[in-house]
């Protein structure tokens, strides 16, 4: 029983696909299948149920995966003990919100790779909620509520929110000066699934209670890029994390409105499926991401971070 076969079994159990597993491990699909068959023959048990649609572990396979995951993680840690800082190697697959990827991570990625030139970064920039296990991500920067109890979360803090309009909107509709003024204003409605939920202006009072003001909307969008573009076109108010709007506020691209009525700060965390056995290369990348986010987050009850 060799380590690479165990690595194949662990990844196949996570991804449920021979094709995805082959891609993730830089092997041919036939090689992945061969590894599994050889291990099944060696152990004398069937490790996976295989159909045209689903690949999932058998009860014997589930037992092996639990132990194999620990063995693979420990082997990676042992190898890392003998790697100097510049010898850290391997692939790290991450998913980041689009705005953070474009304005923070990608511009500073050369710094990380200069320190660890043998790292290979696969960076997904998307605003949808990816499936960490199914899509084979080592870590994901998650903004918003955490709904995956099977994952481990490193909570980074809270992102302060800001209400924005564009100069084009101000020319057409003016600036709302109070909550009462909202009755004659519009909001850009954001919905990842374009579901028929009512558009609202969300705000938090001094006691921390959340409120929703029904508001008219001219457009519903399902991506952050479209959300920003709709605001820029003068189609309504948007509510977005302040950290991503600092430059736009400074150069006049957007204008802050109703500063006394921000939406509830959004939690931000790094989530992963490694449990306590996080490979060193993944820990290094997570520390890098956390350091970039740190100036922009606040702790519960702390003053707002700009």
Image (cartoon, rainbow, N blue to C red):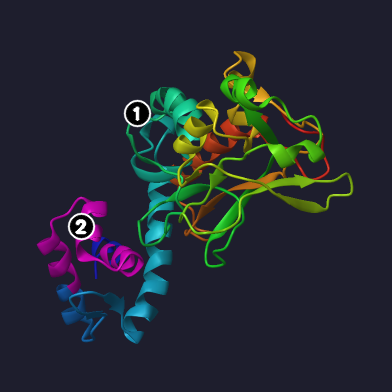
Residue extending furthest toward the left:
30
Total numbered circles: 2
Q: Position of residue 198 (x, y in %)?
A: 60, 56
Secondary structure under tag 2 reads helix
Residue 255, compared with residue 225, is above or below; it is above
- Could you tell me which quadrant the N terminus lies in? bottom left
Residue that sits furthest to the top in the current view: 251
Magenta stretch secondary structure, dominant? helix
- Magenta-colored stretch includes residue 17: yes
State which quadrant residue 45 falls in.
bottom left
The range drawn in magenta is: 8-36
Say whether residue 7 is left or right of residue 30.
Answer: right
**Residue 86 drawn at (x, y percent):** 39, 29
Q: Quadrant of the C terminus?
A: top right
Crowdedness near tag 1: few (<14), some (14–19) or many (≥20) residues, C-alpha within 10 Å: some
Residue 212: image location, x then y, percent: 73, 52
Residue at 41% across, 72% down: 67
Question: Which mark is drawn over residue 22?
Answer: 2
Residue 57 falls left or right of residue 196: left
- Residue 177: give x, y in percent of width and height: 79, 29
| Residue 264 visible in the picture | no
Q: Is residue 62 visible?
A: yes
| Residue 223 position (above or below residue 37) | above
Q: Nearer the viewer, residue 149 or 43?
A: 149
Residue found at x 39% / y 80%: 63
Judge whether 273 appears above or below 113 on screen: below
How far is mark 2 from mark 1, CA to CA?
24 Å
The residue singled out by tag 1 in the image is 117
Q: Quadrant of residue 126?
A: top left
């Amino acid at each position: 029983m060799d380590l690479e076969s165990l690595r194949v079994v662990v990844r196949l159990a996570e991804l449920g696909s021979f094709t995805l597993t082959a891609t993730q491990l830089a092997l041919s699909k036939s090689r992945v299948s061969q590894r599994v068959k050889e291990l099944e023959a060696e152990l004398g048990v069937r490790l996976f149920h295989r159909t045209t649609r689903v690949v999932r572990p058998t009860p014997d396979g589930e037992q092996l995966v639990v132990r194999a995951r620990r063995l693979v993680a420990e082997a990676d840690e042992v190898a890392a003990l003998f790697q100097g800082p510049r010898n850290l190697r391997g692939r790290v697959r991450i998913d980041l919100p689009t705005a953070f990827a474009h304005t923070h991570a990608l511009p500073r990625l050369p710094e990380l790779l200069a320190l660890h030139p043998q790292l290979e970064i696969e960076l997904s920039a998307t605003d949808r909620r990816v499936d960490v296990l199914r899509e084979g991500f080592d870590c994901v920067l998650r903004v918003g509520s955490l709904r995956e109890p099977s994952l481990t979360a490193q909570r980074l803090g809270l992102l302060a929110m800001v209400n924005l309009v564009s100069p084009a909107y101000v020319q057409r509709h003016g600036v709302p000066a109070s909550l009462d003024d909202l009755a004659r204003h519009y909001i850009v409605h954001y919905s990842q699934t374009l579901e028929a939920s009512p558009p609202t202006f969300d705000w938090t009072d001094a006691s921390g209670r959340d409120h929703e003001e029904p508001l008219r909307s001219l457009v519903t969008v399902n991506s952050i890029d479209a959300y920003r573009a709709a605001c820029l076109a003068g189609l309504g108010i948007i509510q977005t994390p302040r950290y991503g709007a600092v430059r736009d506020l400074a150069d006049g691209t957007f204008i802050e409105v109703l500063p006394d009525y921000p939406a509830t700060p959004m939690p931000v965390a790094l989530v992963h499926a490694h449990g306590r056995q996080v490979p060193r290369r993944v820990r290094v990348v997570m520390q890098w991401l956390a350091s970039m986010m740190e100036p922009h987050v606040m702790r519960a009850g702390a003053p707002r971070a700009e």
